[in-house]
Amino acid sequence: MRKILIAGNWKMNAGPTEAKVLADKMVEIWKGKEFSQEALICPPYVSLPFVVKSFRDSFFKTGAQNVSNEDNGAYTGEISTSMLKELTCSYVILGHSERREYFNETDDFIAKKVLKVLDDNMRPILCVGEKLEDRKANNHQTIVKNQLKVVLDQVDKSHAENFVVAYEPVWAIGTGETASPQQAQDMHEFIRTFIASEWNAETADKVRILYGGSMKPGNAEELLSQSDVDGGLIGGASLKADSFSEIMTIADQISK
Ligand SMILES: O=C(CO)COP(=O)(O)O
């Protein structure tokens, strides 16, 4: 059984002051209540210590939006896995389409980071997804398969439980347009089948595959109810404590 992961990607939003207010609000909403699934917030680096502090006595987990593939040393501007672990961060988003597009991150570079994160006993959330032109040309499966293959070729299947994939169709990110539940399910099933062909069915079954792209309270139930959709990677709607909590409540009622 896979636990649903509801993850917020705050991107370059919410500096320390705003982040603390937002995190405190989330904790307040869930005070005294149990959450049967997993909730995660990935703030910008500078806000992480504040969010960690706000979440200290709650079930909310924290993660980062990127990390270096190197150990501590002379790498100006970078942040290491050991620094994130010191803050008790457990997850790292890697290969987000914004990093691929604006910061030229390649599949090989992303694979190195995924390996580093897994080797250091953290959990990568590897983002994959096609652009609109790829979908229109019916190339979406090939694009996603190629993005995954570079990483899967290097990751040992023993990491399956810590390995998280997020399918984020680029055309659905921040656009208000969402993949239909069927489009999401079809791609998630394709991803799981591909992982099974690279590893095996038993390990592929352990990998959580999140959907990302304009997920909000109004469409979360339909998306999260799909058999291969194991959670959400949420941008805009994670910047509002109410919306994020509503999606969590929906996830709480769905068990996989
Ligand atoms: O990119 C995303 C999460 O990583 C999705 O962002 P939105 O939910 O704002 O579309």
Image (spheres, rainbow, N blue to C red):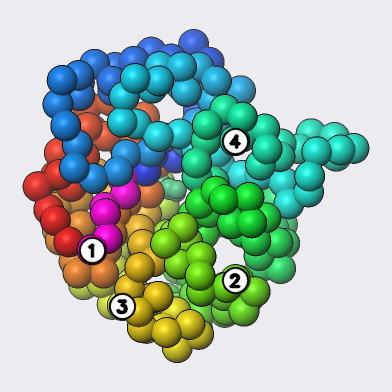
For marks 3 and 4, give the CA distance. Answer: 32 Å
Picture coordinates of residue 123, whole percent (x, y): 51, 51
Q: Quadrant of the N terminus?
A: bottom left
Secondary structure type for disc 3: helix
Q: Which residue is mark 1?
A: 1
Lateral position of residue 229 relative to residue 99, left or right: left
Label 2: state its secondary structure. Answer: loop
User: Picture quarter containing residue 54?
Assistant: top left
**166 left or right of 216?**
right
Circle 3 or circle 4, nearest the eye:
4
Query: From the viewer's perspective, is the residue at label 1 or at label 3 nearer?
Result: 1
Q: Which residue is disc 2 drawn over?
A: 155
Relative to 153, is 86 above or below? above
Q: Which residues are magenta?
A: 1-6
Mark 1 is on which residue type?
Answer: Met
Q: Secondary structure at mark 1?
A: loop
Q: Choose mark 3 or mark 2, whichever is in front.
A: 2
| Residue found at x 14% / y 56% | 255
Q: Is residue 155 above or below residue 178?
A: below
Q: Which residue is mark 3?
A: 189
